[in-house]
Image: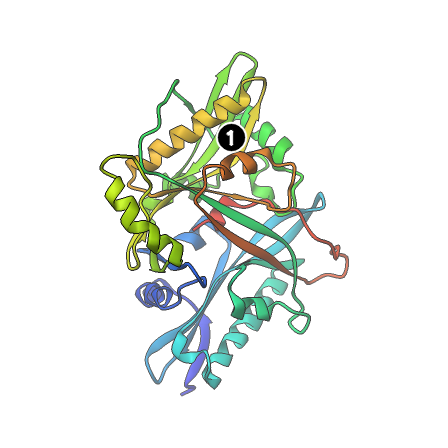
Amino acid sequence: MQPHIVRPASETDNAALIELERLCPQGTRLRMYSERDDYFFRARLYGDAHTLVVEDRGEGRIFGVLGASMKDISVRGERRPAAFFYDLRLHPDYRKSVRGRFMLTAWKAMERWAGERGAHLIYGLVKKDNAPMTALVDSRMGYRFAGGMMIQSRPVFRRSRLREAAREIAPDDARLVARTQAAYGRRDFFPVVFRDRLLTPAMEASGLFSFLELQRGRSWASIGMFRASRVMRTRIVTIPGAYKLLQPLFSSLSPLVPLPRIPREGGSIGYCHVFNHLADGPEGTRLWRQLIAHANNAALEDGADLLTSAFDPFDAGDGFHAMFRRGAMNTIEYRLGIKALVPDLPAVDFSFYPDVRDMN
């Protein structure tokens, strides 16, 4: 019997993959990992996904995993089939052993799968301080960095005052779809599936995604919400020294002054993610701020600790990024790594539309 094999994952691997996630925290100064009851929740949101595991048959355990999904995305205004890589994990006991090389076998197998599915490119997001993964993105592997993504996190620690009730709107609302297309449709990596409806059937069935709108006269604003804390939390392994110093101060003052909770090492945090920021008209910005207040209160109801949003850090004209960042207490930066599988893919830096399905 072959001692190590690369094979497609199955639902029976759920518990083993959750444990592998626990053993593979991400980051350097702030180290954390995702806690999910259902490891395959993310794959189901994409629909067309493929997960490979590397199994040590002698030890009877899975020591590696790699997920990917096929998406039709917009690249420089042209529709391109692409494979998005995610959830690359290797058990720490195998990282410096010959057995760890089987992850390269899995990686190559996933690239073949993408090629067979007609992908024009492969791409993935690498945490900026993830040195081992950053080292893999080089000319020898055929990858390069060509953009990035930034996640800003606002603390959720008290109820915001709401001046007016927001209206929930359908993901196929014609005005919402048109406005989203006008604001984001020309960005690279915008999923074509969102051109007519802003949620896939799987996203809608989950009950975790919604859209809110406020309108006053000629002004309006809207946002999307992903209430992720209902299905997953993030476990904190280590926190930066500055956060440790602030913890006792915040704890002592919190009975007197509303202050954000700084998680302890070993503690967990949940989040609500906001996306597709839109506003127009003389009062559009004020209405957008009110929607962020609505999202804050929704997160509070779910027991979430953070209100997060993802942006293209290289888009200097994104006013929503600047406004959201003013209330943020933490920033996580990612680099966009890509590999071209066809000769006509432009060798340029790309703009980036953060797909909300990638935020879990």
Residue 268 place in picture, x, y as percent: 30, 53
Viewer-nearest residue: 194 or 315: 315
Up-down relation of residue 348 to residue 179 (above or below): below
Q: Indicate left or right for 95 with 349 as reference.
A: left
How crowded pointer 1 is (Cα within 10 Å; few <14, some 14-19, many 20+) is rated as: some
Name the residue furthest left. 255
Count of marks overlaid on the render:
1
Is residue 197 visible from the viewing direction of this image?
no
Residue 165 place in picture, x, y as percent: 38, 19
* Residue drawn at (60%, 52%) of the image: 148
* Residue drawn at (34%, 33%) of the image: 298
Viewer-nearest residue: 11 or 84: 84
Residue 186 place in picture, x, y as percent: 67, 39
Up-down relation of residue 32 to residue 303 (above or below): below
| Residue, disc 1 | 172
Viewer-nearest residue: 238 or 165: 238
The quarter of the displayed image where residue 34 is located: bottom left
In the image, what residue type sits under mark 1? Answer: Asp
Viewer-nearest residue: 250 or 7: 250
